[in-house]
Amino acid sequence: MNRIATTPTPQLSQSSLKRWTLAVAGVCCVGLGGVGAFVPGLPTTVFLLAACWCFARSCPWMENVLIRNRFFRPFLAYLEPGAEMPRRAKGIAISAMWLAISASAVMFAMRGDAIATPAIVTLVVAGAAGTWAIIRWRGATGARECAATNPE
């Protein structure tokens, strides 16, 4: 598989048992990612990332099959160099994040104990950092070169 020069090629595990374990974990992650594509609240991309990581260290050909798969391809679009997050997706992500932060802050405030204030401050700081990261997202600069693996 072609890789950008800045991305090191992952080392295949020397242990046969470890490679089998990683391959099975990758298959399980693909299954969970497939379910997550249809079940609200269950993430898809996170499981596909984990599957790619497992496959890269156990069975590179399985990683290649996953990346080329037309069903999972939209969820792995970030792998393409320079891929940008659409403005609408950024807005939805920031809104959902701040909605969850606000709900958590209200729950902490209702507790009224000594941990509430530091927890709320931590939530707001983490939310600000997350917002900054989403707004500044410019694409995967060190990601794999997938354009060559996509024959379409």
Image: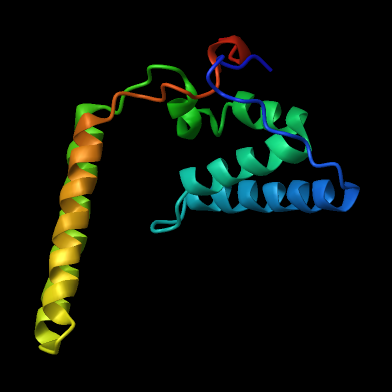
Q: Nearer the viewer, residue 35 or 63?
A: 63
Residue 60 in picture, x, y percent from top left: 74, 30
Q: Nearer the viewer, residue 29 or 35?
A: 29
Up-down: is 132 above or below 29? above
- Which quadrant of the structure image shows residue 77? top left
On screen, residue 108 versus residue 70, left or right, reads left
Colour treatment of the image: rainbow
Q: Quadrant of the C terminus?
A: top right
Tally the numbered discs.
0
Residue that extends furthest to the right in the rendered view of this protein: 16
Residue 65 in picture, x, y percent from top left: 69, 28
Residue 87 in picture, x, y percent from top left: 20, 28
Residue 151 in picture, x, y percent from top left: 61, 10
What's the residue at 41%, 25% (across, down)? 140
- Which quadrant of the structure image shows residue 98? bottom left
- The reply to whether residue 57 is visible in this rendering is yes
What's the residue at 58%, 53% (across, down)? 32
Up-down: is 27 above or below 104? above
Up-down: is 104 above or below 3? below
What's the residue at 58%, 46% (across, down)? 50
- The reply to whether residue 37 is visible in this rendering is no
Q: Quadrant of the N terminus?
A: top right
Q: Nearer the viewer, residue 34 or 65?
A: 65
What's the residue at 49%, 26% (across, down)? 79
